[in-house]
Image (cartoon, rainbow, N blue to C red):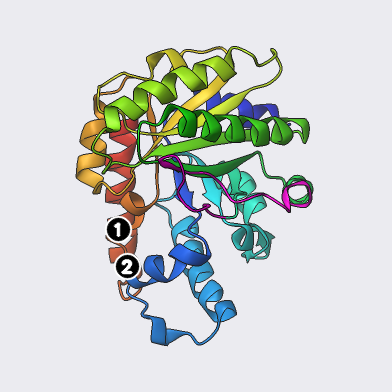
Amino acid sequence: MQINHFEKMKNGKGFIAALDQSGGSTPKALAAYGVSENAYTSEDEMFDLVHEMRTRIITSPAFDSDSILGAILFEQTMDSKIEGMYTADYLAKKKGIVPFLKVDQGLAVEANGVQMMKPLTELDNILKRANERHIFGTKMRSVIKEPNPEGIKAIVDQQFEIGKQTIAAGLVPIIEPEVDINSPEKEKCEEILNTEILHHLNQLSEDEHVMLKLTIPTKANKYKELINHPMVIRVVALSGGYSTDVANEKLKENDGLIASFSRALSQDLNANQTETDFNATLKKAVESIYEASI
């Protein structure tokens, strides 16, 4: 493991950019960027367009290591190149930004008030390729909708099981059990989740480090104990559907929690903007998320 990556994630100032919309969410991400579905006729063309969008973001002068610690990539992005370099190498070498990879294969149907991850049938192969592509860590998402103790326990068990496999492959897992921001009992879900995560963290050995990606809690500083846990490199927050302004305001109330925003980072970017407008818009988003994170 590149120790400077570890050091940067542990102590650096800034946030993580989530650029990992995948199959299901790609058309939505492109539409928000001003590219309609009739602009492409196949999945390959769609991924080419989304790679163009991500390349434009990553190569922008606004996308820099002064504000951005890491970036989460989708598998196709990891295998694609920017200016002749694989994306992770471009991020690390040209930008000084730590590369992560989304490894889950989507969500299973809801049961016990949660959506677990679909079985990660290709995980060993993906982790091997992630190492070859110089990825530092992985991310996998599941979703909690109701305060069902059995469901939440199952989600956290699954996340840490995959997390340990990831650690064994020499990578750092970002464990992401998202609590749905529209859950009527969001705070109760967070209570149970906090307990379950702590239980697992306390069982890790001293060389097993993880990161956590969590919904911004209803009660400010709810996750303080997780943030300060010796086995946790960093706790980052997802925007979960909140607008940039709302997400930033909520984030500011939580000491030590930093952003890992996707939609909130790119919501005002458009394919038809001039380079000047695009860079200025991205810079504004980056600055506001950075401010909220520090």
Give yes or no for contact between labels 2 and 1 (Cβ–Cβ under 8 Å): yes
Q: Which residues are magenta?
A: 106-126
| Residue at the image point whose x is 60% and y is 35% from the top | 158
Give 152 or 275, whichever is nearer the viewer: 152
Dot 1 amino acid type: Gln
Q: Where residue 147 sits: x, y (%)?
A: 36, 31
Q: Badge 1: few (under 14), some or many (20 or more) residues near its Cα, within 10 Å?
A: some
Q: In the rendered view, does 50 fall on the left or right side of 127?
A: left
Image quarter in which the N terminus is found: top right
Q: Secondary structure at mark 2?
A: helix
Q: Is residue 116 magenta?
A: yes
Residue under label 1:
267
Quadrant of residue 159 in the image? top right
Q: Is residue 63 above or below residue 38?
A: above
Q: Where residue 119 sits: x, y (%)?
A: 65, 49
User: Could you tell me if residue 5 is visible in this image?
Assistant: yes
Quadrant of residue 67 in the image? top left
Q: Is residue 134 magenta?
A: no
Give 87 or 117, whichever is nearer the viewer: 117
Dot 2 amino acid type: Ala
